[in-house]
Amino acid sequence: MPYFSNKNKKEAFYMVLHYLEDGSITMKLNMGGKTFNEIFYSEIEYKKFILSL
């Protein structure tokens, strides 16, 4: 898990993706203390979400 150095604290970043048989993608993303749990029904939806961050 990579750590990014900030002046006074460390922030962790991790992402877990699961590709399911029906083509959907489940994602758990923790970024700077914010956690996102999402289900995407296509890779296009997933890419749009990532680009919106």
Image (spheres, helix red, strand yellow):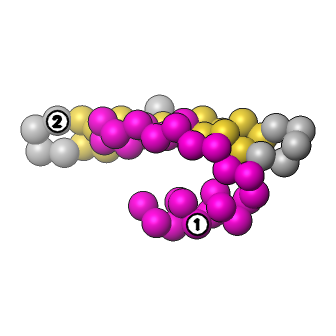
Total labels: the figure holds 2
Specify whether 10 is left or right of 22: left
Disc 2 crowd, CA 10 A, few/some/many (<14, 14-19, 20+): few
Residue at left offset 73%, top offset 59%: 43
Specify whether 16 is left or right of 29: right
Residue situated furthest left in the rendering:
8
Residue at left offset 60%, top offset 35%: 16
Whether residue 28 can be seen here:
yes
Disc 1 crowd, CA 10 A, few/some/many (<14, 14-19, 20+): few
Specify whether 51 is left or right of 5: right
Q: Position of residue 46 (x, y in %)?
A: 64, 57
Choose between 15 and 35: the one closer to the eye: 35
The numbered dot on residue 36 is none
**Residue 42 quadrant:** bottom right
Q: CA distance from mark 2 to mark 1?
A: 30 Å
Residue 33 included in the magenta stretch of the image? yes
Q: Which residue is mark 2?
A: 9
Whether residue 2 can be seen here:
no
Q: Which residue is mark 1?
A: 48
Amino acid, disc 2: Lys
Residue situated furthest top in the rendering:
1
**Residue 22 quadrant:** top right
Highlighted range, magenta:
28-53
Q: Position of residue 31 (x, y in %)?
A: 38, 43
Amino acid, disc 1: Lys
Callout 2: helix, strand or loop?
Answer: loop
* Sooner in the amino-acid sequence: mark 2 or mark 1: 2
